[in-house]
Amino acid sequence: MSNDTLLVRKDDLHTTRLHGAAEQPLADGQVRVRIERFALTSNNITYAAFGEAMSYWQFFPSGEEGWGIVPVWGFATVSQSLHPGVAVGERLYGYFPMAASAVLTPERLSPERFTDGAPHRSALPAVYNQYLRTRTDPLYSAGTEDLQALLRPLFLTSWLIDDFLDDNDFFGARPGVALLSSASSKTAYGTASQLARREGIEVIGLTSAANKAFCESLGCYHRVLAYEELGEVAADVPCVYVDFAGNGALRREIHTRFTNLKHSASIGGTHVDQLAASGAGKSLPGPRATLFFAPAQVKKRSGDWGPAQFGQRMVQAWQAFLGQVADPKAPWLTAQHHTGPAAVQAAYAEVLAGRGDPRVGHILTLTPGNP
């Protein structure tokens, strides 16, 4: 059986090709999973844009020089197993290649999860190597798989950004302002939904004029401004900046305008063409822009609270957020499905270009007939 995979040129993310290869036999202790649905968001473009710097290309090596496989979050079912602890038919949530199937080497099994023990993944962040068994996963619900694939990994980052800022008392910017760029993005509005609960912080979303009404409709920002309206915020207000776009020109404008900027966090790089400019942090006035790395905050808080309390807090926050997003009277997000290799390739090009309705989330499958 062929395993269709979308390959991306590492030095030109706009260049892709579909690759079909015969599935290789399993070794003892391995399982093969059929990847039935995965989300594609600007977060995955960030994985590709930082593929070399942050080792994202290393999770699923393509085996072809210059070509990479973008990691995605989604659901898969075990289709073949040579591991006594994992049964055919078991459903998993986790980090997969943009492919029709994948081979995993389960280790450190528990009723809730297991880790992929493939040697090439051993030095990579553990949070990406864990596969959750849906029958015991407290965040899982069968009727919301699309929203889970689209929002769950992003919301974890959002929740951790909020916690990180509060843990550091907003670096002296409370009372003050939190400025969030790319306010229509899922990670940004997830962060805003958490920050809005903090006393003494005004959450201001920055977005394009075209997306301003959408961001205002969410109700999680105290104010929404188009980028050209940045001058409406007092230049001397104590503030933190959370950059979800990687837009170098905007970052320079914020660092130059705000004389009381306390912290500048870089979360993503969806403006691929401006990544080089966004990296020029040394020449900017104010605090040096710092890349936020979610696994580091996971490690810290797991130590502070213990794994059980960390998980409990995460579940409570996720369920509250999902209730907001899935409100039947005014849903924040609806899923659009793309099935088959050509449709996946086209959807990738659309997300890379930043086109589309922010209320629409892309759910993809390379295997016809799914999800």
Image: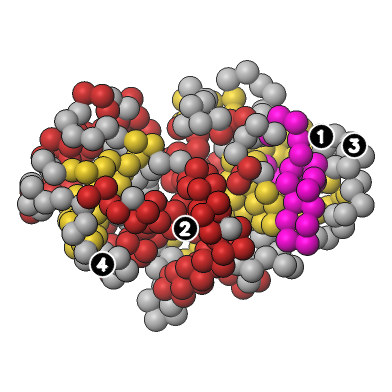
Residue under pointer 3: 27
Marked residue nearer the N-terminal end (2 or 4) = 2
Q: Position of residue 26 (x, y in %)?
A: 88, 38
Q: Which residue is mark 4?
A: 199
Q: Nearer the viewer, mark 1 or mark 3?
A: 3
Query: How far, Cα to Cα, is label 1 from label 3?
Result: 16 Å
Give 271 or 4, whichever is nearer the viewer.
271
Mark 4 or mark 1, earlier in chain:
1
Residue at image position (44%, 80%) is: 328
Q: Amino acid at mark 3?
A: Ala
Disc 1 crowd rating (10 Å Cα; few below 14, some 14-19, many 20+) is few
Circle 2 or circle 4, nearest the eye? 4
Give the quadrant of the N terminus: top right
Identify the residue position indicated by label 1 in the image.
22
Q: Position of residue 76 (x, y in %)?
A: 71, 54
Q: Which residues are magenta?
A: 98-121
**Which structural element holds mark 3?**
loop
Side (left or right) of 51 relative to 238: right
Kindly state the secondary structure of the residue where label 1 is placed: strand
Q: Which mark is residue 155?
A: 2
Residue 82 percent location from the top left of the image: 91, 46
Q: Is residue 108 left or right of residue 326?
A: right
The amino acid beneath tag 1 is: Ala
